[in-house]
Amino acid sequence: MGEGLLTGPFPRVGGELRCGSHRIADLAERFGTPLYVYDMDRVRERVDRFQRAFAGVDHLVAYSVKANGNLTLLRRLGALGCGADITSRGELFRALRAGIDPGRILFAGVGKSELEIREALDAGIYAFNVESAGELERIDAVATSLGVRAPFALRVNPDILSPTPHEYTATGHAESKFGVPLTEALRLYRWASGRRHLEVRGIDVHIGSQIIDPEPYFRALSGILDIVADLGREGIGLEFLDIGGGFGISYDAGPEMDVETLAREVVPTVRKAGLRLVLEPGRSVVGDAGILVTRVHYVKRGGKTFVIVDGGMSELIRPSHYGGFHAIERVDDRAPRPTEVVDVVGPICETGDFLARDRALELPETGELLAVRAVGAYGFAMASNYNGRLRPAECLIEGERISLVRRRETLEDLIRGEDLPETAS
Ligand SMILES: Cc1ncc(COP(=O)(O)O)c(C=O)c1O
């Protein structure tokens, strides 16, 4: 595989993959495989890039917890000044436990329960990003019963079909379940502005994920600024504008979202509107800061050549769920091997259990380590116990420091919470 990335995360030095100064092979030896390895220095760089690009306007980077909710990672992000974009009481619990300031938490999602709304109000979150009239009424009812005011933004659906790599990651078009139509937004804001227990605080849009082109953001921004102006004329003022996340990264050496280009247009526009800017990046903060290290069990030849490894769709579901591409390479490529076109598959009893299909790869030997790149986002976060699998360990590298930030699950973890009642007679 040659020298690989020299300046990005996980460089190859003398044929051996590293995280910072640490050999990946040593980490695999120490913690076992499959293993997630995160480069915290890379995460810091990514946050810093957002902070600098948007410095010209009052802004909040509300990291999207769904991408990777590891507690230590969240704690570090909180210390860097990030807030959190959450989608459930579970993510609220994580964010608070990690020490993220509740005044920097935004709660998204189409199906918030009464319990979730109550807990978020108790915590004092910055805002609910509301996705329907029914939800707004429910928030009003819960806030009224608690005698508090609930700050909210409407997530508007601008009906923009943005070019995402998979239909499942497009969220800004009329047929998606997300947001309220632009035409309905004004009516809901008017209604809410007359309710004692609702506080109109912002407006929100999230058009999809893994978007490389800034142009759909500009279009979405222009649509919502029209609403902001209409509201202003009616005396309904807003504090913030949330342009969501979805900023694309490079999975295959192709381009990524140019955050600076995005900021060049967004910063003056939002500043001119007198609003605070909220961003909800997930993948673009942690995506390329993580690899999955997996060991080759067998090389099996049949109609195709299968490299069977110890990590599969239970550790990383993006390839089978979204058709996601992840670069895969030998951790140690000092001894060259012939290149073959192979499927890299896991041990799960599903044909859809693969990490790569028809991929040209230096054919590894049994027992060798492979690294799957750019899995820091939607990797561990989507891991499961399917097929009785133990979810893997996660380790975090910060300079010289190596921390096991989540231990590998045990067999007892697998049956936690289950009961064995006697057979009914
Ligand atoms: C509302 C919302 N905000 C932010 C994100 C984060 O997206 P990404 O990780 O692509 O930045 C998502 C992803 O699904 C989302 O639904």
Image: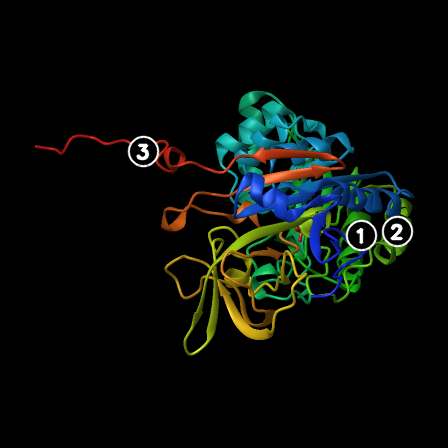
Query: 10 Å neighbourhood of mark 2: few (<14), some, or many (≥20)?
Result: some
Query: How far is disc 3 from disc 1 in space, using C-alphas?
Result: 51 Å
The quarter holding residue 372 reads bottom right
Query: 10 Å neighbourhood of mark 1: few (<14), some, or many (≥20)?
Result: some
Foreground tag (1 vs 2): 2
Q: Helix, strand, or loop for circle 1?
A: helix
Image coordinates of residue 233 in percent, x first then y, are 82, 45
N-term mark: 3 or 1: 1
Q: Note whether ligand 1 is within 8 Å of mark 3.
A: no
N-term mark: 1 or 2: 1
Query: How far is disc 3 from disc 2 in space, using C-alphas?
Result: 54 Å
Residue at position x 60%, y 73% in the image: 338
Foreground tag (3 vs 2): 3
**Are dots 3 and 1 in contact, CB under 8 Å?**
no
354 or 200: nearer the viewer: 354
Q: Which residue lies furthest to the bottom in this view?
A: 303
Query: 10 Å neighbourhood of mark 3: few (<14), some, or many (≥20)?
Result: few
Dot label at residue 269: 2
Q: Mark 1 points at which residue?
A: 225
Image coordinates of residue 421 in percent, x first then y, are 20, 30
Q: Is residue 184 above or below residue 173?
A: above
Q: Left or right: where does residue 409 sit relative to residue 184?
A: left
Task: Check the picture and name the quadrant holding the C terminus.
Answer: top left
Question: Does residue 108 appear anywhere in the picture?
Answer: no
Task: Check the picture and name the quadrant holding the N terminus.
Answer: bottom right
The quarter holding residue 226 reads bottom right
- Disc 2 residue type? Thr
Q: Mark 3 points at which residue?
A: 418
Q: Helix, strand, or loop for circle 2?
A: helix
**Are dots 1 and 2 in contact, CB under 8 Å?**
yes
Q: Helix, strand, or loop for circle 3?
A: loop
Number of numbered discs overlaid on the protein picture: 3
